[in-house]
């Protein structure tokens, strides 16, 4: 896109009005005239990992948004208004390009991320100056020091592919191995899952047998207190059984004691 000559104020106002009415030629003329701002702002974000062509494209999108939203009534020139939209669009794309995991969802977080990116060199050295700067940013943006350090770590360490291989000079235990092969999962193994399912089945069978040995009233109390979606109160159980809530509490205690005695042999056998 060639560098266009700056527009006179009267010509700019006319083009803005025509563009607002859907005149594509006027829109292109305004974009051409302000494209230099897109280039200047995009150059500041070349180190964020996104291709320059993408940054320019996003900047043009922001510029077009500015043209469509611009209202000259306040007396400002389009360039003053458009710079904000261009910078916002490029910054948003730069942050997205830096990490596949979204860095921030709010304006404050994105602003903090951009500030940290610009201060990456100062913070990398650590020391009292770096700690003081981090504390200052945490106070300024209303967050914690730990959150600022976490975000700074995200911004100073680019994403790594799970297929990336350790360098030959790395520890012998990991050299030449892909990152995905070195990640430790905290998920249970299939064998562990099967063992837990089998154990749960055995426990369920023992509990069912113990419940069958209780009286009908005792089973009713245990079911209402421990098996329903909502745990029934002693008052509600007492009304259904025709006893006081204190008596219902005593009956529950007796039923639990009986259950414990019935299950004790099996528990003792498992502990050996």
Image: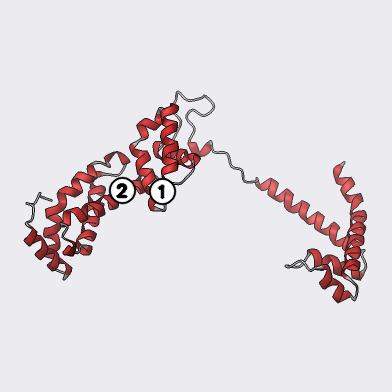
Residue at 90% in and 76% down: 242
Is residue 168 visible in the rendered structure shown here?
yes
Closer to viewer: mark 1 or mark 2: 1
On the image, numbered disc 1 is attached to which residue? 109
Up the image or down, 137 lies above or below 7; here it is above
* Count of residue discs: 2
* Figure check: 219 above or below 180: below
Q: Is residue 190 left or right of residue 53?
A: right
Residue ID at (41%, 34%): 133
Question: What secondary structure is marked by label 2?
Answer: helix
Query: Does 51 appear above or below 16?
Result: above
> Which residue is pictured at 40% across the width and 27% down the height?
125
Mark 1, other Cα within 10 Å: few <14 / some 14–19 / many ≥20: some
Residue drawn where x is 71% and y is 50% of the image: 194
Q: Which residue is mark 2?
A: 91
Tag 1 secondary structure: helix
């Amino acid at each position: 896109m060639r560098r266009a000559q700056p527009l006179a104020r009267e010509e700019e106002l006319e083009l803005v009005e025509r563009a607002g009415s859907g005149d594509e030629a006027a829109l292109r003329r305004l974009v051409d005239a302000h494209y230099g701002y897109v280039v200047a702002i995009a150059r500041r974000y070349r180190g964020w990992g996104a291709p320059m062509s993408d940054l320019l494209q996003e900047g043009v999108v922001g510029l077009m948004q500015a043209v469509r939203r611009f209202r000259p009534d306040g007396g400002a020139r389009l360039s003053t208004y458009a710079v904000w939209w261009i910078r916002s669009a490029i910054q948003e794309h730069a942050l997205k390009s830096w990490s596949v995991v979204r860095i921030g969802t709010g304006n404050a977080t994105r602003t903090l991320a951009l500030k940290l990116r610009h201060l990456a060199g100062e913070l990398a050295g650590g020391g009292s100056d770096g700690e003081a700067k981090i504390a200052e940013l945490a106070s300024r943006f209303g967050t914690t020091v730990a959150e600022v350090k976490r975000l700074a770590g995200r911004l100073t360490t680019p994403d790594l592919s799970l297929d990336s291989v350790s360098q030959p000079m790395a520890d012998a235990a990991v050299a030449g191995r892909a990152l995905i092969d070195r990640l430790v999962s905290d998920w249970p193994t299939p064998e562990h899952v099967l063992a837990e399912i089998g154990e749960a089945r055995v426990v369920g069978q023992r509990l069912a047998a113990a419940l069958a040995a209780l009286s009908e009233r005792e089973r009713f109390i245990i079911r209402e207190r421990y098996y329903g979606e909502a745990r029934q109160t002693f008052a509600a159980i007492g009304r259904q059984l025709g006893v006081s809530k204190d008596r219902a509490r005593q009956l529950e205690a007796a039923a639990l004691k009986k259950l414990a005695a019935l299950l004790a042999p099996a528990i003792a056998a498992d502990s050996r």
